[in-house]
């Protein structure tokens, strides 16, 4: 059995010491060393990369097990099954990490969660002790921050997996509420603690690489709904989706929901991990290609990809449905960060010249999919369908998503467009 990484009482591993002395300044490039190219070359479909994944998944990066879901599969389920839920790993899953290249639940009774930093008493909490605590459910959209990245190419293509709309899913999580857990553990933060950092077990490809850790302001209201998740869709969390323990913050992008949770750290400052300080960030002000590059991000000119931007996605009809001209039912989903109810979804069949108000089904939770539908006419020939969601706070999808272009291609939420021939 693979042993979990260990930490000293002060939580200063070799890699973490490197982080605190400036290794993060090297950026994400330190972690881009191909770890198992031979696996990528041998793989013919997604099931050969991640055991248990559907062979119909769209592979974006075989080396890192990055794959998205065809919308024709995604639309079939209210709760996205593990076999077709999009996948995103940050480090190679061979050798010591081979155990998480599967949709099966990991057998890790040895798992512990370290609580450390400026707390009254650092400690290790066993998995079985967490499992014995009362659990709650959270139905929440899980979405990669890069979902929709390929659409930015209409202005200028950016690096990374060229996701369309399949980097998302609607999932039922079950776990111990974070605030309750900290209360049960009698964690007493020292004065000056402003940040909670979560760190995953997965490790970089090179010794000098950055750990995967994410930080949240201790007063962030989203933490009130966070859970230490133990189950996904009623079963133990699959290894590839972060089992046996994952931090789930409903309404937040996938990278903020740390997989393989192994450390909770309370500190005065946020983590200097490259994934927090320079990666997965969005510019504070609009930028144009050439004036702001992927290596220009700092904690001062950008923010982390926290809550979902409001978004809608058309599920039907799609081009492969080959609809007939005349009245058809147009369906899809919408979602946001859960901070306000989605009140309107407008749909057009003529690229935005005229609009129809869709009916919206009540969601299972503030963070879940809002299913919507509307009947409208398709003209013979080419039709461009457009959907646009708006919530109670007045937040709406930009008709031109390119106004939010950024050099890493995050947080695409332009009005969704599908061109079909009737």
Image: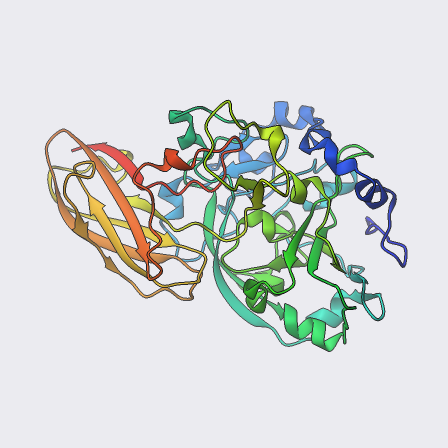
Asked if residue 243 shows in the view, the reply is yes
Asked if residue 132 shows in the view, the reply is no
Tell me which residue sits at (73%, 34%) in the image: 25
**Number of callouts:** 0
Tell me which residue sits at (69%, 59%) in the image: 196
> Looking at the rendering, which quadrant does residue 170 occupy?
bottom left
Q: Colour scheme of this structure image?
A: rainbow
Q: Is residue 397 left or right of residue 294?
A: left
**Which quadrant, please, contains the C terminus?**
top left
Q: Where residue 139 sits in the image (x, y, percent)?
A: 47, 63
**Along the viewing direction, whichever of 80 and 179 lies nearer the viewer:** 179
Q: Where residue 348 sits in the image (x, y, percent)?
A: 19, 43
Q: Is residue 307 left or right of residue 196?
A: left
Tell me which residue sits at (69%, 29%) in the image: 29
Q: Where residue 272 sits in the image (x, y, percent)?
A: 73, 45
Tell me which residue sits at (53%, 69%) in the image: 137
> Looking at the rendering, which quadrant does residue 350 occupy?
top left
Q: Is residue 268 left or right of residue 238?
A: right
**Along the viewing direction, whichever of 310 and 134 lies nearer the viewer:** 310
Q: Is residue 357 left or right of residue 88?
A: left
Q: Where residue 414 sits in the image (x, y, percent)?
A: 35, 40
């Amino acid at each position: 059995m693979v042993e979990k990484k260990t930490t000293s009482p002060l939580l200063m591993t070799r890699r973490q010491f490197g982080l605190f002395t400036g290794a993060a300044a090297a950026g994400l490039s330190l972690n881009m060393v191909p770890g198992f190219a031979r696996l990528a070359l041998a793989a013919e479909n997604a099931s050969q990369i991640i055991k248990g994944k559907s062979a119909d998944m769209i592979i974006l990066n075989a080396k890192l097990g990055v794959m998205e879901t065809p919308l024709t599969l995604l639309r079939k389920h209210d709760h996205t099954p593990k076999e077709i839920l999009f996948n995103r790993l940050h480090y190679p899953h061979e050798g010591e990490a081979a155990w998480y290249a599967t949709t099966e639940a990991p057998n890790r009774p040895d798992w512990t969660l370290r609580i450390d930093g400026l707390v009254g008493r650092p400690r290790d909490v066993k998995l079985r002790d967490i499992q014995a605590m009362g659990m709650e459910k959270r139905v929440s959209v899980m979405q990669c921050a890069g979902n929709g990245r390929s659409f930015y190419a209409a202005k200028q293509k950016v690096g990374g997996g060229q996701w369309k709309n399949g980097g998302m899913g609607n999932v039922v999580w079950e776990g111990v509420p974070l605030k309750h857990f900290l209360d049960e553990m009698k964690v007493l933060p020292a004065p000056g603690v402003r940040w909670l950092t979560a760190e995953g077990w997965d490790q970089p490809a090179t010794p000098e690489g950055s750990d995967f850790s994410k930080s949240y302001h201790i007063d962030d209201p989203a933490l009130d709904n966070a859970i230490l998740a133990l189950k996904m869709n009623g079963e133990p969390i699959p290894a590839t989706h972060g089992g046996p323990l994952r931090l789930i913050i409903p309404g937040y992008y996938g990278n903020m929901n740390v997989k393989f949770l192994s450390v909770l750290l309370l500190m005065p400052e946020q983590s200097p991990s490259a994934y927090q300080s320079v990666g997965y960030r969005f510019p504070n002000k609009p930028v144009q290609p050439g004036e702001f590059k992927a290596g220009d991000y700092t904690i001062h000119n950008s923010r982390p990809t926290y809550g979902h931007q409001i978004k809608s996605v058309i599920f039907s009809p799609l081009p492969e449905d080959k609809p007939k001209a005349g009245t058809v039912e147009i369906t899809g989903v919408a979602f946001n960060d859960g901070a306000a109810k989605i009140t309107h979804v407008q749909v057009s069949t003529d690229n935005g010249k005229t609009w129809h108000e869709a009916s919206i089904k009540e969601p299972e939770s503030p963070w879940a999919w809002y299913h919507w539908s509307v009947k409208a006419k398709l003209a013979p020939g080419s039709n461009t369908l457009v959907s646009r969601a708006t919530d109670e706070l007045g937040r709406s999808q930009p008709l031109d998503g390119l106004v939010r272009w950024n050099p890493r291609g995050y947080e695409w939420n332009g009005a969704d467009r599908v061109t079909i021939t009737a």
